[in-house]
Image (cartoon, coloured by chain):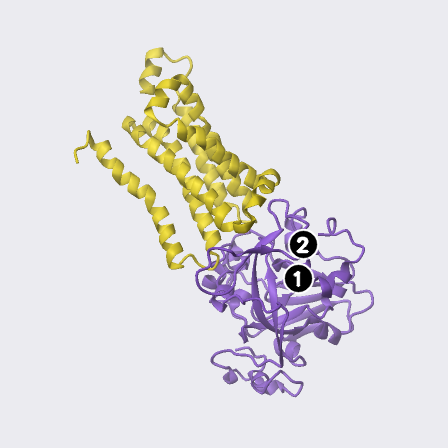
Chain colours: A yellow, B purple
Amino acid sequence: MVFRDRIAATKPLVFVLCLLPFAHLVWDAMHGTLGTDPVAQLEHRSGDWALRLLLATLAITPLRRFTGWHRAVRFRRMLGLFAFFYVSVHLLIYLFVDLGGYWADIFEQIAKKPYITVGFAAWLLLIPLALTSTQGAMRRLGRHWQRLHRLAYLIALLGVLHYYWLVKADHREPILYLCAWIALMLARLRARPRADAPRSNAARLRT
Amino acid sequence: MLGLGAAALATGCGSEAASPQATAPQAKLPDKSLAVARHVDDANGEAQTTYTDATHYNNFYEFGANKSDPAARSGRFAAHPWSVEIAGLAEKTGRFTLEDILKNHALEERVYRMRCVEAWSMVIPWVGFPLAGLLDRFKPLASAKYVAFTTVERPAQMPGMADRILDWPYREGLRMDEAMHPLTLLAVGMYGRELPNQNGAPLRLIVPWKYGFKGIKSIVKIEFVESMPRTTWNVMAPDEYGFYANVNPAVDHPRWSQKTERRIAGTGFNLFGNRIETLPFNGYAEQVAHLYAGMDLHKYF
């Protein structure tokens, strides 16, 4: 296979890497090696990877701005779509494996339980982002595309909140995710061209 | 080496004849098995949780907040020798060795459902004796309306205590009539063996109609008190964990539903079909509902 450049050549590797946690999950599920509460394991692990990939997607912009490695943006769509994939797997596990015969309870849960509400909202908000992730959609939406895709910050925050609210007492891990989110947010704001900066400079930064 | 007098147990059911001399450490049974006087299945014949699952999926935050921490990090914990302080409003108080505590009580096996407030459950064969029998020995005064329990505090042996996740020591409590109820058990073993450290060795409380966090582990103090004692989870989040903490599908935890639970039991492929309906008082309503007659269970949750 001939690749256009090194980034294109690396993409299949990143694809496989992103798929590994899922493969591991399926392997453990099939071999009964998920531990005492396999359903909780499936939920926690798929949720962890969803959060990590959401944050990884958000890290691309600051990474470009601070390292000057602008072509990193070419991994962003794949990471974002994998984040959507893991959030969807997480939701499906909750619905069909965990709730099982009680899956209709989901409506009550979404309405009444804040952590489910925000988790579900995050998944819903990801749908338009996934649908508009193509080059064609980017072209058609023009500058609206970027505005729409800033939702990714809100979505990641909802994901962190979802985690924080379901923990009983030990909030250290969700707080770590929250810190990562805040750091990425600050990095983004700092890396942003100042409004009074010369146009040419702003344009240069954006490429 | 459950001084519980291996001898007493080996001869069958800690009878009153057990002499304190019989508790020499050499008498330790290699497999730590316990002899029981009778078996009662109070879980309707439902499939039991495996020993491995019940001993490797624990909430015992003194050893760490992950479910696997207690089994992995409780190896240094020394459950023997052990003593329990009996205090408060009773005729007899003082410090008693574990052997003293146990000597007059025939051990029995009770299979109970265990419903965690996190909406999962197990079915576990405990070995112990009714708490009522022990409390009676100390002749509680009429003014004693509640019983308060405290867990041991040993930061050097309990690595989870370095993190101030909860306000140590762990405390729990029961109303006197709850404490005296025949279903309320002081357990020293499970699955016919001594309690492993991660399950609350050497002495823990089991109150099957309440959420699992009421079942305080590794008890070092039992106090008779007049007013409702402060309990760890209730102090930490009073809107989420009540003093009573009776299993009740009609009263949700503010953050998650309590209508159903995921049952962890049996062996083999267990991914699907684990969710079952939660029963009022964890299925023990017939035996205990009268204790709460006339009380608004939404208010006194």
B225 in relation to B12, above or below: above
Amino acid type at mark 1? Gly
Residue in the image at 64% along x and 45% along y: B254
The local secondary structure at tag 2 comes to: loop
Q: Position of residue A73 (x, y in %)?
A: 32, 28
Residue marked by disc 1: B283
2 or 1: tag closer to the N-terminus: 2
In the displayed image of the protein, which residue is found farthest to the left?
A: A2
Q: Residue at x 39, y 19 (%)?
A: A141
Q: Are marks 2 and 1 in contact (CB under 8 Å)?
A: no
Q: Position of residue A174 (x, y in %)?
A: 49, 43
Query: Whole-percent x and y of residue A173?
Result: 48, 45
Residue type, mark 2 in image: Asn
Residue B170 appears in the figure = no
In front of the other: B47 or B22: B47
> Relative to A171, does residue B8 appear above or below in the rendering?
below
**Foreground tag (2 vs 1):** 1
Q: Relative to B105, is A167 on the left or the right? A: left
**Above or below — where is A19 with respect to B44?**
above
Residue B186 relative to residue B156: left or right: right
Quadrant of the rendering where the N terminus of chain A is positioned? top left
Instruction: Please indicate whether residue B158 sits to the left or right of residue A130 in the image.
Output: right
Percent position of residue B76, x then y = 47, 67
The quarter of the image holding the C terminus of chain A is top left
Question: Is B285 in front, or is B60?
Answer: B285
Q: Are marks 2 and 1 on the same chain?
A: yes
- Chain of the residue displaying label 2: B
State which chain disc 1 sits on: B
The disc placed on residue B100 is none
Instruction: Identify the residue at image location x=66%, y=51%.
Output: B241
> Residue beneath label 2, please?
B248
> Is residue A123 shown left or right of residue B152?
left
